[in-house]
Image (cartoon, coloured by chain):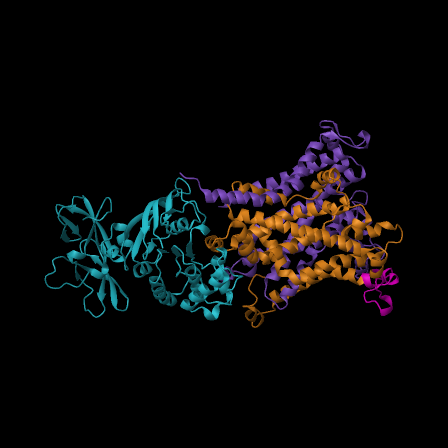
Amino acid sequence: MAKLELQNLTKAYSRDIVPVKKLNLAVEDNEFLTLVGPSGCGKSTILRLIAGLDQPTEGRVMIGDRDVSPLPPGDRNIAMVFQSYALYPHMTVRDNVASGLKMRHLPAGDIQKRVQEVSGVLGLDPLLDRKPAKLSGGQRQRVALARALVRNPDVFLLDEPLSNLDALLREQVRADLKQIFEDQKSPIVYVTHDQTEAMTLSTKVAVLSEGHLQQLGHPHDIYKTPANRFVASFIGSPQMNLFPLSRSGNDVALGDFRLPLPGGVQAASVILGIRPEHLRLPQEGDAHIVSGNVFLVENLGMHDLVSLKVQGDPSLTLRALISADASWSKENLKLALPPESIHWFDGETEQRLK
Amino acid sequence: MTTVPQTTSPPAQTGDRSFPWMRVLLWLAIAFTVIFSLAPVLWQVLTSFKTNAAITQTPVVYLPGLDQLTFSHYLDLFRLNQFHIYMFNSALVAIVSTVLCLALGSPAAYALARLRIPGEQILLAIVLVVTLFPYILLFLGLLEVVRAFGLANNYLALIIPYTAINLPLTILVMRSFFQQLPRDLEDSARVDGYNTVQMLWRIVLPMTLPALVTTGILAFIFAWNEYLFALTFMSREGMKTIPVAAAQLGGTTLFDVPYGPLAAATVVGTLPLVLLVLFFQRRIVQGLTSGSVKG
Amino acid sequence: MTRDYIRERQQRTGWLLVAPALVLLLLVYAFPILRAFWLSFFTENLSTNLEPVFSGLDNYAQLVQDGRFWQSMRNTAVFTVLTLIFELGLGLIIALSLDQAFRGRGLVRTVAILPWALPTALIALAWRWIFNTEFGVWNDILLRLQLIASPVNWLGDPFWAMVAVIAADVWKTTSFVAILLLAGLQSISQDLYEAHALDGASPWQSFRQITLPLIAPQIVIAMLFRFAQSFGIFDLIQVMTGGGPGGATEMVSIYIYAAVMRYLDFGYGAALVTVTFLVLVAIVGLTWLYLARLRAKTE
């Protein structure tokens, strides 16, 4: 078991196409790191660099104390689950699972034992002699997992392993994945564009955009204290309300409403953020209240997602999640902004203001 | 001609409206296609079974009686003209060159599909342009090569050019096949610890078999049918291939043209290809189109 | 920057994989053409005891005044243009009918590609027999239909011999054109036709406005391939007429073959090869440029 460390990792295809820029990351044993970001943010490239399928332009990949950068993928003792599962179509499930072990010339008896173990855990026993074409999507996905687990690798890499499953199955398999990997000691790097997967599975999330690491931290922290505007808008659903505002004195104006800036803020312009789920119907004692006319109500079941135009500036759209039981009027709806739930970002740098 | 989807629209067109023109046109075109494609071949088959008297009877006999049918032209072909030798030569040259062509062409196709070698675009352009060269432009230079290496009347004199003339098509068809293979499989093999050669041999090749069959059939057809090189490089009787030997049947006797054996020779020489087409129609079409359209 | 070992290793393997094929292609394609170009500046025939003697542009000077060469070029041009027109027309009809759904379509498709697969030299024998003056089935049919009064000497008459070889070549190669066009037709989504029909278009209109523009690439490619092959046609003519009667069907390729193999005039044969190659390249190149410009204009 070993720690995975990326040092100053850079991948450039040309001067302008640089999918990974000077990335530093460490994943310890028992850690589950998720790389999350929009498509094209470089997350898959990072995985390929760790696997050795691509070579970094600069920087190193360390596993334990070993610099594996010059090693081909087969010598790195990593296992990878591909988005398309990449099962060899001409081999049975058993041979697919055993393939990586055979390449390492393990004794046949050991191979058989380990395949049996893993297939028992994943419920593959009745499928072992089938070819991949005869399996359902969920079964293929489990074979792909088995092929990784059987290897006892130093690092697990998973590239959007759930994205080819339909929505219902995905939730089920996500839960299974969490259980399976809780028993694994080796560091896990998981790539996804789905923030729910990132939040539920990981012990650590890295949010990436345009090749840069935007924030690294526990899922909870990333939700609670997003480091910048990008993370704030990317994590959380429905999306956080974000309003670029210019300050006047120690206040900012949101339509007709004035809100005080927290103390010590120097920035000339700021961005105010508040999550729809943190807006609420006013109670007594609420200091900051805005109002406006509702123009759209989307029923999400437990909640209504309400969109309203802020009074005084119709270009500002505020979205709020309101419990479906609550009663309210569409005209001039008042909403409270709890101060502890407001996020402030610098208007220039878009970084979080302390 | 019709472009309206016939499966979905015929009731509307045939029932309440006037005469179903489209349907009639379609069947006329199909009848034309079938007659056009088959008639010359069938006529040759019929001729090959007619007695010499029936062949040279006027007006032409379309439905020969039993006494006008014979198998002797075929027997002559093998007894007098040793057609089994020509068959063997054709088969040997075609099969060996096909196998060679696949062995050389598929790795090149893989490299051009996957390995991003510098000059890839130029190589592809060369391969494409070369498919347009008529063989007649090559035969003079090849004749010199054949003479320089003393390859006249040697199977290699045909195997080498046949391998080469099939390479462009092989490379184009196989390349478009490799491009359709999911890349993840090869990445997965690398992570599993396969090196490039092992990966090609144990992961890529098994998946490639159908495409190899397709390409192989095309290469075999071209090699079996080639005439110019076979005519030029093989002068000894025992080394000739079917097309040359058959074409020269008529030239041997000046006055009495052996129509029957000629027809029989045509049938014998085309039969292997007719069988190939019957069994592999779909693959042939697929190979031809992926080789020339996508390339 | 560190070196990209993976990429380098990949490229090294790539070149190793490509090299054997490339060497063979160069040997069989590039060498003969370059060799012909070189040899065309030498006289190498019976008068020089088949030894090459440098003679500058003599071969080309001879070629310019060689009526037989120009005649063969004219024949080739007529043959190529007419076969291309008929193949495209018939190929389109066959492709369109094979694109429809009907019972037995697979069988008809098999039948339709048969002519393409058969050896040209043997097919030439079959056609020679069909066009036989005395016993040929074609004369018999025409006589029975009373379209002709007495048998036509198809392969013995300069005009009809050309007609006969064109007919045979069209038969042999139309299926290739049809296969390519069919692939184009099948890549057109049925939705397009349905949408167009809802707009009120007639089948003829959708053929003009949807089918033709969308299979234009396949038409161009099929014609390009067919042009090059037709231009270099050898086996069919050699077996059917040998270039006769009196040179009426002598194509450039037949003349080249005769110059080398019959008259043993290697230097002149090389000049013929060189000029034919350049003409072919020029026509293909100019067509390509024209099409590229046309495309640039419409976009």
Determine if the magenta segment contains residue B59: yes
Residue at 19% x, 69% y is: A326
Q: Is residue B76 left or right of residue C100?
A: right
Q: In this structure image, what is the colour of chain B?
A: orange
Residue A13 at least partly seen: yes
> Of C253 and B235, which appears nearest the observer?
B235
Residue at 71% x, 32% y is: C40
Q: In this view, does B135 lie to the left or right of A85?
A: right
Q: Position of residue C218 (x, y in %)?
A: 58, 52
Q: Position of residue C10 (x, y in %)?
A: 50, 45
Residue C162 at least partly seen: no
Question: In the rendered view, would you say A152 is above or below A67?
Answer: below
Q: Position of residue A43 (x, y in %)?
A: 37, 51
| Image quadrant in which you'd find residue A220 | bottom left
Q: Give the range drawn in magenta.
A: B47-73
Q: In which quarter of the image is the N terminus of chain A?
A: bottom left
Task: Tally the numbered discs.
Answer: 0
Q: Farthest left residue?
A: A285
Q: Is residue A332 left or right of residue B210?
A: left
Q: Farthest bottom residue?
A: B15
| Image quadrant in which you'd find residue B142 | top right
Q: Where is residue A72 in the image (x, y as percent from the top left)?
A: 45, 48
Q: In this structure image, what is the colour of chain A?
A: cyan
Question: In the rendered view, would you say B93 is above or below C23?
Answer: below
> Of A58 and B9, which appears nearest the observer?
A58
Q: Is residue B163 left or right of residue A14?
A: right
Q: In this structure image, what is the colour of chain C?
A: purple
Determine if the magenta segment contains residue C73: no
